[in-house]
Image (cartoon, rainbow, N blue to C red):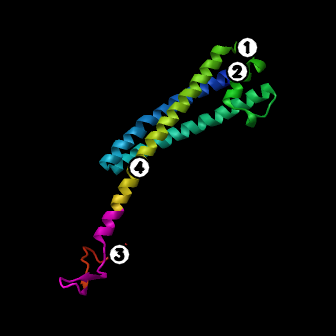
Amino acid sequence: GILMLDLSPPVKLLSIFEKEAELYSKFLDPSRQKTEVLINGDVRELGNITKNELVLIESVGELEETREQAVSEIACGMGVEASSLTISSIIDNLDKAWDKGWDKAWAEKLKKARANILCTIEEIRKTNMRNKVLIDASLEYIDFSLNLLSSTNDKGINYSRDGKEGNSEKLSLFDVKL
């Protein structure tokens, strides 16, 4: 991999953003696969996909730590607190702190990498919302099915042909109330 220590902080930040964009794009396929798996009801495959996503999440977390270090270095170079910086403010102010080859082309690359990440995250969010709807519908169906199968022998009121009240027994497959 690239040795991050050899890069100036802005170049390091760009490299991190490009790697994050690549990692986030790797979340799209599993997210879409989950949709198919949920439709097909393949719980085992859903577990496998989730395990693979955990590895990606760990990688993103490691990159986030590196990104925070780069932002701290940039903040130090700009003479501001790291917590006050946004990517937009970094892009707008980099020329004030670094003149070693940092130009508008680098700023555009950083903007593009940021836009790629945001676009990918939005696509993941939409796919996850679709998956949530599928999961919720599946849970509602399971709940309905369990209630239907486990309706107990509660006495209910029934009306006979002549309109008089009478007691009736509800039939149940199981002697269990959930």
For the point 80% across and 31% down, the residue is 80
Determine the CA span between mark 1 and mark 4: 50 Å
The residue wearing badge 4 is 133
**Along the polypeptide, which appears first: circle 1 or circle 4?**
1
Determine the CA span between mark 2 and mark 3: 66 Å
Q: Quadrant of residue 114?
A: top right
- Position of residue 30 relative to residue 2, above or below, is below
The residue wearing badge 3 is 177
Residue 80 numbered mark, or none: none
**Along the polypeptide, which appears first: circle 1 or circle 3?**
1
Q: Is residue 160 magenta?
A: yes
The residue wearing badge 1 is 100
Q: Is residue 132 visible?
A: yes
Mark 4 surroundings within 10 Å by alpha-carbon count, few (fewer than 14), some (14 through 19), many (20 or more): few
- Proximity of marks 1 and 2: CB atoms separated by less than 8 Å: yes
Q: Secondary structure at mark 3?
A: loop
Q: Is residue 161 left or right of residue 17?
A: left
